Image (cartoon, rainbow, N blue to C red):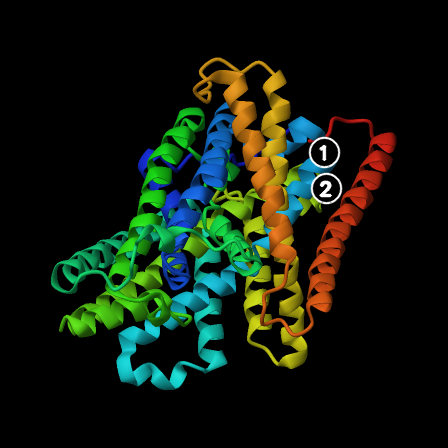
Amino acid sequence: MPETPTPCALKRELGLFDLVLFYVAGGLSLRWIATAAAAGPSTIVVWIFACLCFFVPLAACVLELSSRYPEEGGLYVWTQRAFGDFSGFIAAWTYWMSNLPYFPAVLYFGAGSALFALGKRGEHLTNEPKYYMLFALSWLALITLLNIFGLRRVKWLNNCSTIGTWIPVVVLLGLGAIFASRYGSATSFAGAQLIPHADLKNAIFWSTIFFAFGGVETGSFMGEEIKDPRRTIPRSIVIAGALIVLCYVAGTIAMLIALPSSAITGVGGFVSAISLMCTKLSLGWLITPVALLVVFNSIGSATAYLSSTSRLPFVAGIDRYLPPVFGRVHPRWCTPWIAIGAYGLVGMLCALLSQAGTTVRSAYDVLVSMSIITYFIPFAFLFASMIRLQREPAPAGTILIPGGKPVAIVLASLGLLTTLLTIVLSVIPPDEEPNKPLAVMKVIGSTIFLVSAGVAIYYASNRRLRRATALYPVEKQ
């Protein structure tokens, strides 16, 4: 009898250096520096608050959980272990669905930045939907194909894209220093200016800053494709996390030193601000290379999230809560190619919806509304899992949070409370919303719809599994 061929196993392609660059590419988006600077100097305090109350607890929890349980799936596995299969599936479902509108958003930012490199030749494309749509679709198709071919190939795109983060930040800091020495600061950093206004509008803006600090949870989704994940993931989180926080805070300060907050606007806010600085200093030649590097930053962010988040439907497919085809590994490239391809195609569908006509565009608006709350639901599961899993003894060689169980519970509780507060703030409509009750109902209703869809899929799959187990009593794969 011929032997049954051994299924191709996932390959461990990512080392410490690769993972640090992966976290930087996915967790440091230059568009948030301009967004924060446009809100004024009080955002510096908001950055620090978000760092201490959300980012530090998140990084600490991911650091320990990824060292305790370094399996493929990360968040899915941790929540499943803490609260069962249903919670694990819903955590994964809300995470991958809420990130779908992220792809067109970050790639449209890159497309807008690319127009600065074209100069006057690109002015006619500024309000051209087809340009933004083609840009997003082309890059999503390339990113998806490279991921299917393996992390060995796609990691080089991610690593090179990280250059699009470092150089623009260094240029921004340099320009800020020149402006400070020649003209002084364009923004007052007096004590009164740094105090965030305790009004509803500014409180809502805080949820945007918290959103910017997400990303350090993604690397653990690829646990079985990382070399020595029990030690590599925690070390890379510490290194990349420190760099991300430093760049966000220092970059915002430098931009506010060079320009007043009122001058920082637009879809390409970062490059627009750089352009204004370079023009005033007669350094116009810098605009084009910086703009191109910012384009690479947006591509790197999309690459990181597609690479990592596509592993969640793969693990759910293995557990058969999604069709088993999602759990297949390609026999040649040893990648979860069905899960990657499906997620990439749905991301491209979102890009199409976002620039389609009025009727179809409304479908994309619903997706965005869904993502407002559902983006933070998985983080609530993550922090709650961290608290619950403290009852389990840590395996040998696990990297634990300094201070042990008490500190771990305090940090996870702080992160959970901050996440719940952010969910509440994200429901509140902005001042410019003409029909606030309708906007609130739209956000809450679309979130209920999305979660209900996940619940329906889970129970349908669970019922099918029980029926199959009754007929063929074998272990769940």
The image quarter containing residue 257 is bottom left
Residue that appears at 63% across and 43% down:
420
- Left/right placement of residue 259 relative to residue 174 reads right
- The residue identified by callout 1 is 85
Q: Which one is nearer the viewer's eye here, 91 or 388?
A: 388
Residue 262 image offset from top left, x and y in percent: 36, 70
Residue 250 image offset from top left, x and y in percent: 29, 50
Position of the C terminus by quadrant: top right
Q: Which one is nearer the viewer's eye here, 247 or 323?
A: 247
Residue 247 image offset from top left, x and y in percent: 31, 48
**What amino acid is labelled 2 in the image?**
Tyr
Q: Which one is nearer the viewer's eye here, 68 or 465?
A: 68
Position of the N terminus by quadrant: top right
- Marks 2 and 1: which is nearer the front? 1
Callout 1: helix, strand or loop? helix
In the image, residue 471 sits, relative to residue 314, either above or below, namely above
Callout 2: helix, strand or loop? loop
Residue that appears at 45% across and 68% down:
108
Residue 470 image offset from top left, x and y in percent: 87, 31
Residue that appears at 52% across and 29% down:
411
Q: Is disc 2 in contact with disc 1, using a CB cutoff of under 8 Å?
A: yes
Mark sitting on residue 95: none
**What amino acid is labelled 1 in the image?**
Asp
Would residue 114 be visible to someone looking at this image?
Answer: yes
- The residue identified by callout 2 is 321
Would residue 317 be visible to someone looking at this image?
Answer: no
Furthest-bottom residue in this view: 124
